[in-house]
Image (spheres, rainbow, N blue to C red):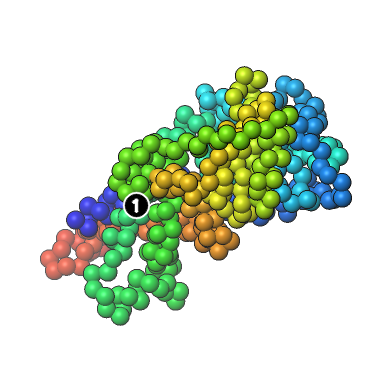
């Protein structure tokens, strides 16, 4: 049985190794994106706070749209609560039939605006921005969705099987002292082959649980059956429909976008940030808004829907109002990135991603060295030293 498991482990590893390596490297780079971007792009993220109130959101949006151009309609606003941060607006258009990252995104811009003056600080070509390229490599291998969906999906499925089979192969037959030492520690004084084997074996064990969580949460975004399975388990093996936020009778008046935003700010004065989806069409019914209550995760949020003309609150839903399946889905990003545990979780996710990238490399080295050894063994059959062996080289010398 272990021989069968070993063959499954080997061939799935060889088939998915390059993709798993890329996912691990890009995952490690992207692990601290929320912490790195404000440092790398300090001049566009931060502004000088003023004692005057910020301009109405509709006015700031209008200034951003004029600077970007009417041909690129802004669809999303990222509004930090901190008084020294710029407002960020996004304009995106996707071509589902695109074969590469650059044809998949027809355009993607971010506009950074000073909310006190309405002055545009920077217009970013996000399609070619470094961190977005890293994310696109992680999610789509810089390919279009219709290709990468299958490549990423099959590779991650293979990786989950590799992890489980790896633990089976790692599991010691006997828990003796020497076996424990081999299973839990790297023998740095050993040969290069031994160190490589230990790095594959031992680090794979220590990162197993984190990588399994990352693999499953990644599959939730790729396949609907994975999402449904996670929801089914989280709901206690019951099929429960996805929840919709309950209707509210709260009414407002005035400009829809400004009224909705001010209502959210008044209702959640301790909120850390707001993400607003701006209706792209005039006949759209509502403005959707996510209110984030912490800086270190994305699951602790409130979902709200407002009438885009009057600003009337239509629906509102907190994390605590969700059923088990919807809570699991809302936690998916934080579980995948380690953000569910804050900065310590991101650090763990960073090292787990590096180990993920190393496993195909160390695994390939193990397979290649054994393959070379086997090849050498086959070529030396005629010079075997067993009694009575046929030795053509020796007969040639005697002749």
Q: Secondary structure at mark 1?
A: helix
Q: Residues within 10 Å of mark 1 (few under 14, many from 20)?
A: many
Q: What percent of the width, then of the height, locates residue 304?
A: 58, 38
User: Eyeballing the image, is 298 above or below 388?
Assistant: above
Q: Nearer the viewer, residue 390 or 8?
A: 8
Residue with the most extreme bottom position: 177
Task: Give the residue at x 61% y 35%.
Answer: 250
Task: Give the residue at x 28% y 65%.
Answer: 171
Q: Nearer the viewer, residue 163 or 372?
A: 163
Q: What percent of the width, then of the height, locates residue 44?
A: 78, 45
Residue 112: which quarter of the image?
Answer: top right
Q: What percent of the width, then of the height, locates residue 41?
A: 75, 48
User: Eyeballing the image, is 222 above or below 94?
Assistant: below
User: Eyeballing the image, is 66 above or below 328?
Assistant: above
Task: Give the residue at x 61% y 54%.
Answer: 294
Residue 75: which quarter of the image?
Answer: top right
**Looking at the image, can residue 147 be seen?**
yes
Position of 307 with respect to 49 (left or right) is left
Position of 161 with respect to 110 (left or right) is left
Total numbered labels? 1
Q: What percent of the width, then of the height, locates residue 68?
A: 77, 29
Q: Nearer the viewer, residue 129 or 362?
A: 129
Q: The C terminus appears in which quarter of the rendering? A: bottom left
**Looking at the image, can residue 25 be seen?**
no
Q: Quickly name the residue at label 1.
A: 162
Residue with the most extreme left position: 388
Q: Nearer the viewer, residue 240 or 208?
A: 240
Task: Give the residue at x 31% y 64%.
Answer: 170
User: Eyeballing the image, is 70 above or below 152?
Assistant: above
Residue with the most extreme top position: 283
């Amino acid at each position: 049985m272990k021989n069968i498991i070993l063959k499954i482990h080997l061939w799935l590893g060889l088939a998915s190794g390059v993709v798993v390596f890329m996912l691990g490297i890009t995952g490690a780079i992207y692990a601290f994106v929320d912490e790195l971007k404000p440092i790398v792009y300090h001049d566009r993220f931060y502004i000088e706070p003023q004692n005057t109130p910020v301009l109405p959101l509709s006015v700031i949006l209008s200034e951003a749209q004029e600077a970007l151009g009417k041909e690129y309609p802004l669809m999303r606003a990222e509004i930090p609560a901190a008084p020294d941060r710029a407002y960020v607006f996004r304009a995106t258009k996707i071509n589902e039939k695109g074969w590469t990252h650059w044809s998949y995104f027809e355009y993607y811009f971010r506009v950074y605006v000073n909310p006190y003056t309405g002055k545009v600080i920077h217009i970013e070509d996000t399609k070619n921005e470094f961190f977005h390229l890293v994310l696109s490599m992680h999610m789509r291998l810089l390919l279009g969705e219709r290709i990468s969906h299958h490549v990423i999906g099959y590779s991650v499925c293979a990786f989950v099987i590799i992890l489980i089979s790896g633990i089976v192969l790692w599991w010691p037959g006997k828990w003796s002292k020497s076996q424990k030492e081999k299973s839990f520690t790297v023998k740095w004084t050993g040969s290069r082959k031994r160190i490589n084997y230990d790095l594959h074996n031992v680090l794979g064990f220590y990162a197993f649980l984190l990588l399994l969580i990352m693999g499953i949460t990644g599959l939730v975004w790729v396949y609907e059956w994975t999402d449904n399975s996670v929801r089914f388990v989280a709901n206690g093996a019951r099929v429960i429909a996805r929840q919709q936020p309950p209707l509210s009778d709260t009414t407002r008046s005035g400009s829809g976008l400004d009224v909705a935003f001010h209502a959210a700010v008044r209702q959640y004065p301790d909120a850390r940030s707001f993400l607003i989806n701006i209706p792209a069409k005039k006949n759209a019914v509502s403005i959707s808004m996510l209110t984030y209550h912490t800086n270190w995760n994305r699951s602790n949020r409130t979902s709200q829907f407002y009438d885009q003309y009057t600003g009337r609150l239509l629906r509102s839903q907190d994390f605590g109002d969700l059923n088990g399946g919807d809570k699991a889905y809302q936690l998916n990003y934080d579980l995948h990135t380690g953000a569910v545990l804050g900065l310590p979780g991101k650090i763990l996710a960073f090292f787990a991603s590096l180990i993920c990238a190393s496993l195909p490399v160390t695994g390939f080295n193990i397979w290649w060295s054994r393959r070379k050894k086997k090849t050498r063994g086959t070529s030396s059959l005629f010079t075997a030293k067993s009694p009575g062996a046929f030795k053509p080289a020796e007969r040639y010398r005697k002749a």
